[in-house]
Image (cartoon, helix red, strand yellow):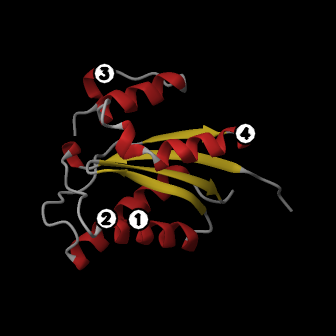
Amino acid sequence: MAYTQLFTHLVFGTYKRQNTLSGANYERLIRYFSKTLTNKKCIPYEINGTENHLHFLISMHPTICIALLTKDLKLAGTSFIKQEKLFPHFNGWQAKYGAFNISYDRVEAVQNYIKNQKEHHKNKSFEEEFIELLEKSGIKYDPKYLFND
């Protein structure tokens, strides 16, 4: 038997960071993502964002690959949005994403950070936030390619 605790903070935006995830259907999308994660043997601790991006705090099942999980979430989310006609101007997700390991002692802080996304983004753009997350995690990137959907 394996004993694991694999917390991941996953972040991805809408295509070209268009503000398309707004209105009454936003909560339906969050619930759908939560159910999708549960079906993939992951535990969603928090999901929230703004009109142009989403944050997920997930306890990953050890057999799940983050790249495939992210791909599956984006595909399932797009299908759900289009099938249910949730956001008429939604054009898909950005190709890139960020995934950051979270230690157990940081779970509550990251959960609160995700809960307060709308307040947080009154003073900071998604692009600024994403670069900050990359830099805090020591992830090297080329700014030229970071937001070229």
Q: Nearer the viewer, mark 1 or mark 3?
A: 1
Other residues around mark 1 within 10 Å, as few (<14) / some (14–19) / many (≥20): some
Would residue 22 appear left or right of 55 to someone viewing this image?
left
Task: Provide the residue designation for mark 2.
Answer: 26
- Residue at position x 61%, y 63% in the image: 42
* 3D distance between C-alphas at marks 4 and 3: 31 Å
- Residue type, mark 3 in image: Pro
Other residues around mark 2 within 10 Å, as few (<14) / some (14–19) / many (≥20): some
**In which image quadrant can residue 23 be found?**
bottom left
- Residue type, mark 4 in image: Asp
Task: Provide the residue designation for mark 4.
Answer: 105
- Judging depth in this view, the residue of 64 and 81 nearest the camera is 81
Q: Is residue 99 above or below residue 20?
A: above
* 3D distance between C-alphas at marks 2 and 3: 30 Å
Where is residue 43 drawn, in percent x and y?
Answer: 62, 63
Discs 2, 1 touching: Cβ within 8 Å: yes
Where is residue 11 drawn, in percent x and y?
Answer: 43, 45
Task: Provide the residue designation for mark 3.
Answer: 143
Where is residue 127 drawn, in percent x and y?
Answer: 30, 31
* For marks 4 and 1 on the same chain, the one whose residue lies earlier in the sequence: 1
- Residue type, mark 1 in image: Ile
* 3D distance between C-alphas at marks 2 and 4: 30 Å
* For marks 2 and 4 on the same chain, the one whose residue lies earlier in the sequence: 2
Would residue 112 appear left or right of 74 to someone viewing this image?
right
* 3D distance between C-alphas at marks 4 and 1: 25 Å
Task: Provide the residue designation for mark 1.
Answer: 30
- Residue at position x 31%, y 64% in the image: 26
